[in-house]
Image (cartoon, rainbow, N blue to C red):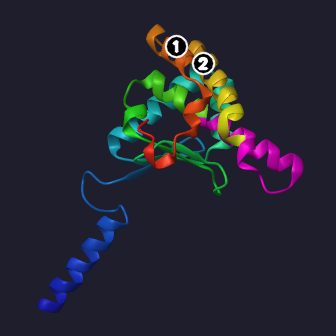
């Protein structure tokens, strides 16, 4: 009986650690070609943001679905464009501010992935970080995000806030980003 309890405890622990466990654990959901991984609330929020992009900004939606494979709930937000498939880690602060802000952030980071993959396709070589990150790339991604926020009818405060963002915030180390 003790052996059976030990096996059950080990199995349960492994399931929880792998994300298959308790009710508050991570789930996996598909939205068209994208995989969403996070809590059920995260999955719902991201799904609504993607639906908003799909209906109000089809070009931004196409970019997201072609340049991002997984949107994953994370501690920090950031694009992992070199992964196969590309992974966008999205933190709760950005995801849950509003559906429109979440959609804008998805558009922003999908543009980072676009810059990465466009370079890779054209040069068939290692992609230098400055091509898809850093201030020049950040300026392009912010411009895209602002355009998308307008297209989806985001509130003025979100559009105004996006206008105040400067490309130098990309210099903040990933682990210190709270957005």
Measured from the top left, where is residue 144 in percent x and y? 66, 24
Q: Are marks 1 and 2 in contact (CB under 8 Å)?
A: yes
Residue 145, relative to residue 12: is it above or below?
above
On screen, residue 74 versus residue 171, left or right, reads left
One can see residue 104 in this view: yes
Q: Residue at x 65, y 57 (%)?
A: 84
Measured from the top left, where is residue 136 in percent x and y? 71, 32
Q: CA distance from mark 1 to mark 2?
A: 6 Å
User: Magenta segment range?
Assistant: 109-131
Q: Residue at x 65, y 27 (%)?
A: 60
Q: Residue at x 66, y 41 (%)?
A: 133
| Quarter of the picture holding the N terminus | bottom left
Measured from the top left, where is residue 175 in percent x and y? 45, 49
Residue 63, relative to residue 99: is it above or below?
below
| Residue labelled with disc 1 | 159
Measured from the top left, where is residue 65 in percent x and y? 64, 39
């Amino acid at each position: 009986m003790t052996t059976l309890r030990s096996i059950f405890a080990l199995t349960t622990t492994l399931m929880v650690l792998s994300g298959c466990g308790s009710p508050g654990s991570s789930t996996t959901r598909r939205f068209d070609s994208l995989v969403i991984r996070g809590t059920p609330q995260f999955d719902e929020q991201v799904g609504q943001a993607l639906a908003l992009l799909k209906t109000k900004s089809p070009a931004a939606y196409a970019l997201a679905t072609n340049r991002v494979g997984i949107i994953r709930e994370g501690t920090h937000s950031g694009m992992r464009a070199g992964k196969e498939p590309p992974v966008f880690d999205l933190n709760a602060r950005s995801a849950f501010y509003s559906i429109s802000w979440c959609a804008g952030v998805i558009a922003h980071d999908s543009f980072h992935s676009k810059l990465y993959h466009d370079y890779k396709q054209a040069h068939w070589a290692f992609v230098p970080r400055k091509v898809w990150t850093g201030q020049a790339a950040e300026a392009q991604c912010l411009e895209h995000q602002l355009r998308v926020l307008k297209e989806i009818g985001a509130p003025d405060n979100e559009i105004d806030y996006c206008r105040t963002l400067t490309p130098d915030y990309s210099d903040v180390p990933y682990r210190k980003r709270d957005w």
